[in-house]
Image (cartoon, rainbow, N blue to C red):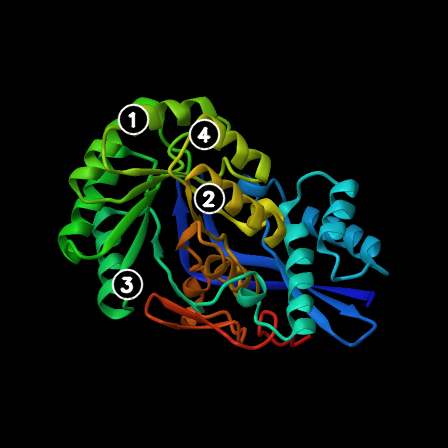
């Protein structure tokens, strides 16, 4: 089997409302969808969702890289995913979301060729994944109302609350949320690099009193030493997670050696797709670290790949693959991949991603 052609199409859809995090405001979902075609008529789909302040890519630069990668992949065996990554890495450093699009499409082809849904291809047996939903930074009363809607109306039992701009306001919002939804709903927070070390230590104590399970990326992405010190000095039950610090298996190995965190957040757009995501999960398992698979402003193509990774790996025990829910109508219009009932996502049993191309 050989790759004969790769199409690249733009996917754009607005969020229902702008989404505030500590390092920026996200207003819509723009991504590139790729269709990798082969000489046997089997095709695979992938998606690239660049985010400048995370992946270092813009939509424009991502497109240029995708064009370069697409030309280089012509004639390549799509079943040779290791070789594909060697080829892509030899052409350009980084650019995780562009490489993720190619990677996901190749795994989609492999699943179709072998007649297996992606999660089974990767080693999973259970298609059910329990997912959280994210609350952006806003006035505490609005965040409380959003939490109540997600729990009471949408049926979610795990919340991820964005923090990191002002600790006092963060705690006020979390206090109101906890009072509104009760003690049974799980909560974790994501500071998106917004705290320094001492503020993060204070935050852990406040979060513990509110029954918050975990705090994600409180310190700058580059501060591995600070993360290790924070973990050593954290005497609370609040688990510590790295996100923007973990782009590659090398980052995961470094974090494991320094004992920087209790969790790693694997994002396919950061690490370049499933191939490296699997490696990060294995490194984490060997180090006794758990994982979550997260997302950015993505559609169901890459989200299905991410949820499949959750279902496949023992070390991955949490899922934060909710971006499509913030589109108008709580959907992105892409059929297949998985179904959702509240926070319970169930992957399809169709081969590959289980998503049909409409272009």
Q: Position of residue 299 (x, y in %)?
A: 53, 63
Say whether disc 2 or disc 1 marks the residue closer to the N-terminus: 1
Q: Is residue 355 left or right of residue 61?
A: left
Decide: few, some or many residues near mark 2? Use Cα within 10 Å; few <14, some 14-19, many ≥20.
some
Determine the secondary structure under disc 3: helix
User: Which residue is at 69% across, 46% downward?
Assistant: 61
Nearest the camera: 100 or 141? Answer: 100
Secondary structure beneath label 4? loop
What is the spatial separation of the Cα atoms under label 1 and label 4, in whole angstroms? Answer: 13 Å
Q: Which disc is residue 150 wearing? A: 3
Residue 132 can be seen in this image: yes
Q: Quick one: label 2 or label 3, which is nearer the N terminus? A: 3
- Give the crowd class for mark 3: few <14, some 14-19, many >=20 residues within 10 Å: many
* 2 or 4: tag closer to the N-terminus: 4
Real-space Cα separation, disc 2 to disc 1, in angstroms: 29 Å
Q: Is 218 located above or below residue 129 in the figure? A: above
The answer for how far apart the CA atoms under marks 3 and 4 are is: 30 Å
The label number, if any, that marks residue 199 in the structure image: 1
Crowd rating for badge 4 (residues with CA inside 10 Å; few <14, some 14–19, many 20+): some
Disc number at residue 103?
none
Q: Quadrant of residue 211?
A: top left
Which residue is at a point 41% across and 27% down the rendered structure image?
Answer: 227
């Amino acid at each position: 089997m050989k790759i004969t052609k790769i199409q690249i199409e733009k996917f754009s859809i607005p969020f229902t409302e702008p989404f505030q995090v500590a390092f920026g405001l996200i207003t819509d979902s723009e991504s590139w969808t790729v269709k990798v075609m082969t000489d046997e008529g089997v095709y695979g789909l992938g998606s690239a969702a660049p985010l400048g302040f995370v992946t270092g890519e813009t939509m424009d630069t991502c497109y240029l890289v995708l064009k370069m990668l697409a030309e280089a992949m012509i004639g390549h065996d799509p079943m040779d995913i290791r070789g594909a990554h060697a080829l892509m890495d030899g052409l350009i450093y980084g650019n995780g979301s562009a490489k993720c699009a190619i990677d996901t499409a190749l795994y989609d082809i492999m699943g179709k060729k072998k007649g297996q849904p992606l999660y089974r291809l990767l080693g999973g047996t259970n298609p059910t994944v329990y997912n959280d939903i994210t609350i952006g930074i806003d006035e505490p009363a609005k965040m409380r109302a959003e939490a109540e809607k997600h729990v009471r109306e949408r049926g979610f039992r795990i919340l991820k609350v964005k923090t990191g701009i002002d600790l006092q306001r963060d705690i006020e919002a979390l206090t109101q949320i906890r009072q509104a939804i009760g003690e049974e709903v799980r909560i974790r927070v994501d500071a998106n690099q917004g705290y320094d070390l001492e503020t993060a230590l204070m935050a852990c104590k406040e979060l513990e009193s509110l029954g918050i399970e975990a705090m994600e990326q409180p310190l700058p992405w580059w501060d591995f030493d600070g993360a290790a010190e924070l973990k050593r000095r954290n005497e609370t039950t609040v688990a510590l997670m790295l996100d923007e610090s973990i782009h590659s298996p090398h980052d995961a190995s470094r974090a494991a050696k320094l004992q920087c965190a209790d969790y790693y957040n694997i994002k396919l757009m950061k690490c370049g797709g499933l191939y490296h995501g699997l490696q990060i999960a294995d490194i984490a398992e060997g180090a006794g670290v758990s994982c979550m698979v997260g997302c950015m402003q993505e559609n169901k193509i890459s989200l299905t790949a991410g949820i499949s990774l959750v279902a496949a790996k023992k070390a991955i025990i949490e899922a934060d693959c909710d971006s499509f829910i913030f589109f108008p109508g709580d959907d992105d219009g892409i059929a297949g991949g998985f179904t959702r009932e509240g926070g319970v996502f169930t992957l399809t049993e169709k081969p590959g991603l289980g998503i049909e191309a409409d272009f």
